């Protein structure tokens, strides 16, 4: 429930020319129950249609200003956040029902934890479910040599990170999430996993991981990996795969949840007794 006083949760959404997706994202935040929250949308001048729709249909706080990219937009929103707990949700992502309350309860029960990672459901651009991603806690050496095994749509953290200045480095345009998580180890933050589905991540075909410049960023990242860590990559990968097996990441998961789809909006569509595999989906390319 949105409030005027300081809320329990602050959720930041970076936005630019994704109004159709943003409608679903904003709805998935607006109907969260059992916890107070604010939704901060940082829009990089999409245009009057977006501004009019947000102000007429959501309780979100809209800030329209030029930014230096997605990570700069997120930082701007986090600096405005008033909540005790924080998160960011991209336009093509959603929260499942009750997510913010479950996450808030976890933090209340575990005051020693600074960052929480949850499970996520992957969908295609039609928002039909494709796969279930069981989160595995990141660790430093694996984060250095491999892409993140966590999704930011299912990442939640205490406000102390913002107060500490543990924000995103806007010098990274594509893999800033990875650099951000790596900073957790340098700062000594305590991490935990919530093995429950919290969020929906849509593979739209236009996700940042598909951007043409991602290869160049990975090469720049690799230059900063210590030679010892690079040499130990086979051991690091084997350790990570074992952890995934032990924690059920290679098991099928049956879901019983609801999210917004193009056909169901403005209501959530309920998916029940749907069994999902664990593999990362590969979208079929449509013929030209």
Image (cartoon, rainbow, N blue to C red):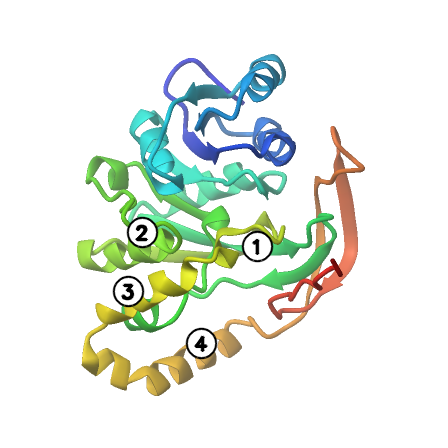
Observer-nearest residue: 125 or 153? 125
- The answer, for residue 138, to whether it is visible in the render is no
Q: Disc 2 versus disc 4: distance between alpha carbons?
A: 29 Å
What residue is pinned by disc 4?
243
Q: Residue at x 27, y 42 (%)?
A: 167
- Asked which secondary structure carries label 3, the reply is helix
Residue 226: quarter of image: bottom left
| Nearest to viewer (mark 3 / mark 4) | 3
Q: Classify 10 Å Cα crowding around label 3: few (below 14), some (14-19), many (20 and above).
A: few
Please state the horizontal and vertical placement of residue 215, each as a whole percent of the image. Answer: 40, 65
Q: Residue at x 41, y 84 (%)?
A: 238
Indicate which disc, 1 or 4, sits on the residue closer to the N terminus: 1
Q: Classify 10 Å Cα crowding around label 4: few (below 14), some (14-19), many (20 and above).
A: some
Q: Residue at x 62, y 36 (%)?
A: 21
| Nearest to viewer (mark 1 / mark 2) | 2
> Residue 61 has which mark?
none
Observer-nearest residue: 63 or 212? 212
Indicate which disc, 1 or 2, sits on the residue closer to the N terminus: 1
Q: Classify 10 Å Cα crowding around label 1: few (below 14), some (14-19), many (20 and above).
A: many
> Residue 172 has which mark?
2
Q: Disc 3 versus disc 4: distance between alpha carbons?
A: 28 Å
Residue 213: quarter of image: bottom left
What residue is pinned by disc 3?
220
Q: Disc 2 versus disc 3: distance between alpha carbons?
A: 10 Å
- Asked which secondary structure carries label 4, the reply is helix
Q: Residue at x 75, y 38 (%)?
A: 262
**Is residue 125 toward the left or the right of residue 102 in the image?**
right
Measured along the vertical axis of the image, is residue 234 above or below residue 101? below
Measured along the vertical axis of the image, is residue 195 above or below residue 228? above
Please state the horizontal and vertical placement of residue 24, each as a whole percent of the image. Answer: 64, 34
């Amino acid at each position: 429930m949105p409030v005027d006083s300081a809320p329990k949760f602050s959720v930041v959404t970076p936005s630019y020319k994704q109004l159709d997706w943003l409608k679903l994202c904003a709805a998935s935040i607006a109907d969260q129950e059992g916890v107070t929250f604010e939704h901060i949308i940082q829009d990089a001048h999409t245009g009057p249609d977006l501004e009019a729709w947000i102000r007429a249909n959501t309780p979100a706080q809209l800030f329209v200003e030029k930014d230096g990219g997605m990570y700069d937009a997120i930082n701007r929103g986090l600096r405005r956040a008033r909540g005790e707990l924080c998160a960011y949700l991209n336009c093509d992502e959603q929260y499942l029902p009750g997510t913010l309350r479950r996450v808030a309860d976890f933090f209340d029960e575990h005051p020693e934890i600074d960052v929480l990672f949850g499970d996520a459901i992957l969908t295609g651009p039609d928002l039909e479910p494709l796969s279930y991603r069981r989160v595995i806690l990141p660790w430093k050496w694996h984060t250095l040599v491999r892409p993140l095994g966590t999704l930011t749509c299912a990442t939640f953290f205490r406000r102390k990170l913002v107060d500490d200045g543990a924000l995103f480095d806007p010098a990274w345009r594509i893999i800033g999430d990875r650099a951000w998580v790596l900073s957790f180890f340098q700062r000594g933050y305590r991490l935990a996993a919530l093995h429950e589905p919290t969020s929906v991540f849509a593979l739209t075909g236009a996700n940042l991981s598909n951007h043409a410049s991602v290869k160049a960023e990975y090469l720049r990242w690799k230059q900063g990996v210590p030679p010892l860590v690079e040499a130990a990559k086979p051991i690091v990968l084997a350790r990570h795969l074992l952890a995934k097996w032990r924690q059920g990441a290679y098991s099928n998961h049956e879901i019983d949840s609801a999210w917004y789809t193009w056909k169901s909006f403005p209501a959530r569509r309920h998916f029940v007794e749907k069994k999902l595999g664990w593999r990362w989906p590969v979208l079929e390319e449509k013929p030209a």
